[in-house]
Image (cartoon, helix red, strand yellow):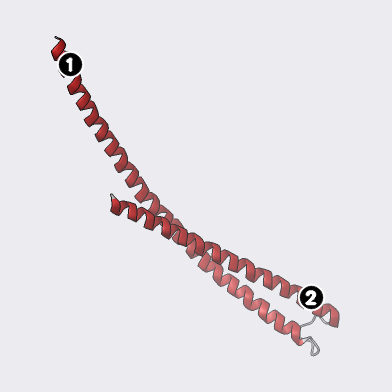
Amino acid sequence: MKSRNSLIRLKRFQVDEKRRQVTQIEMMIAEFERMASELDDQILAEQKRVGITDVTHFAYPTFAKAAMQRRDNLLVSAGDLKGQLDAARAALSEAVEDMKKVELIEERDQMRDRVTADAIEQDQMDEVASRLAFRTA
């Protein structure tokens, strides 16, 4: 029984850890996308300030080119993280299923133990009742 309780605690810990991983990846993706959006705003502001929107123009601002590269790198990283997020969600789902299986087994065993205990108690009560009936007869 103790080993099963330990197993249940382990499975719950694993589920919690997987949930933390999923949350952390989601937060990183959101942060990368926010930073990319800020870079977009900075690029547009620089283009507006200079008056050149053509990236191939010889006088296109170096800052805007560098910001575009950083933005693109952030979006690529966010895309990579989305793949990791899918894998982390799948691992979380699997961990939840494993935990539920162990919990159901434990619940089933507890129910069986209760039924057995109830049957023993009923047998004892029947024995007492038959002794009382035998004495009064």
| Front residue (pair 105, 80) | 105
Rendered location of residue 22, percent (x, y): 52, 62
Q: Residue furthest top?
A: 137
Task: Locate residue 51 relative to residue 65 in the image: left or right.
Answer: right
Vertical order, 23 against 56 (above or below): above
| 10 Å crowding of disc 2: few (<14), some (14-19), many (20+) | some
| Front residue (pair 68, 97) | 97
Vertical order, 1 against 125 (above or below): below
Taking the spot 35% from the left edge, 50% from the top edge, the residue there is 102
Q: Amino acid at mark 1?
A: Leu
Residue bearing mark 1: 132
Q: Earlier in the sequence, mark 1 or mark 2?
A: 2
Q: Is residue 90 visible in the rendered structure shown here?
A: no
Residue bearing mark 2: 44
Rendered location of residue 6, percent (x, y): 33, 55
Location of the C terminus by quadrant is: top left
Q: Amino acid at mark 2?
A: Leu
